[in-house]
Amino acid sequence: MEYTKVFDPDQVVFRIDLNLPRVRVPDEAVRAWLPLVTELRPVAMEFSEAHPDGLREGFVAQLLVAVPLPEGGPGDALRSLLGTLGAPDLRVTEDAWLEGGQAQAEATGVGTSGPYGAYLVLAAVGHDPLNPEGDRQDYPDSGDDL
């Protein structure tokens, strides 16, 4: 998702990856995700059919969502989001909140969680978790060394 936005330092920004493996047509995927999109009101959303050679089947989506930082801190925002996703069983790693203002929640293996098929949530305070500098990133390397 190529979206560049500068967020306020008092916002928690989430990247939410979703997968509906049993869905075979785009209309069905959109209908399944519409209640979530309506509730979360993402600033950006991308959805597509899963790549035939990838680990996922059906349809995948990524939402970029920003919410006000609650009084209880970013951990409260993450727990609230997991409740909205119906995905309390995602494994959460919050130790990074203290250092870089980031955290993540993920499904183990290639599974998904909840009715929306959440499998990865990245969170950061005041910036996009995938783009901490706030500007568009350029990665010219092929990634062959990964």
Image (cartoon, grey):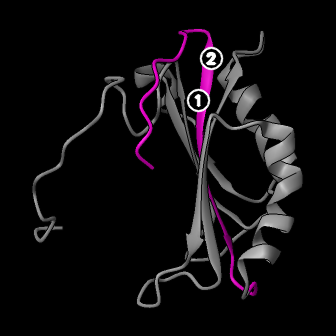
Q: Residue at x 75, y 84 (%)?
A: 23
Using the rendered image of the protein, determine whether residue 120 is visible from the camera's viewpoint: no
Q: Nearer the viewer, residue 77 or 35?
A: 35
Which label number is shown at residue 13?
Answer: 1
Quick check: marks 2 and 1 in contact, CB under 8 Å? yes
Which label number is shown at residue 11?
Answer: 2
Q: Nearer the viewer, residue 40 or 11?
A: 40
| Magenta span of residues | 1-23
Residue 133 rendering spot, x and y as whole percentages: 31, 23
Q: Residue at x 46, y 24 (%)?
A: 5
Q: Please tell me whether residue 113 is drawn above or below residue 82 in the rendered image.
A: below
Residue 2 rendering spot, x and y as whole percentages: 40, 45
Q: Nearer the viewer, residue 108 or 113?
A: 113
Mark 1: secondary structure: strand
Q: Residue at x 65, y 83 (%)?
A: 58
Q: Amino acid at mark 1?
A: Val
Judge from the rendering whether residue 144 lies leftward or rightward of residue 76; answer left or right.
left
Judge from the rendering whether residue 46 lies leftward or rightward of residue 19; answer left or right.
left
Q: Please tell me whether residue 97 is drawn above or below residue 130 in the rendered image.
A: above
Q: Residue at x 82, y 35 (%)?
A: 80
Using the rendered image of the protein, determine whether residue 4 is visible from the camera's viewpoint: yes
Assess disc 2: are there few (<14), some (14-19) or many (≥20) residues with their C-alpha within 10 Å of its C-alpha. Answer: some
Q: Please tell me whether residue 1 is drawn above or below residue 67 in the rendered image.
A: below
Q: Amino acid at mark 2?
A: Gln
Judge from the rendering whether residue 98 lies leftward or rightward of residue 16; answer left or right.
left
Pick out the residue farthest to the front: 27
43 in the magenta segment: no
Residue 30 rendering spot, x and y as whole percentages: 78, 65
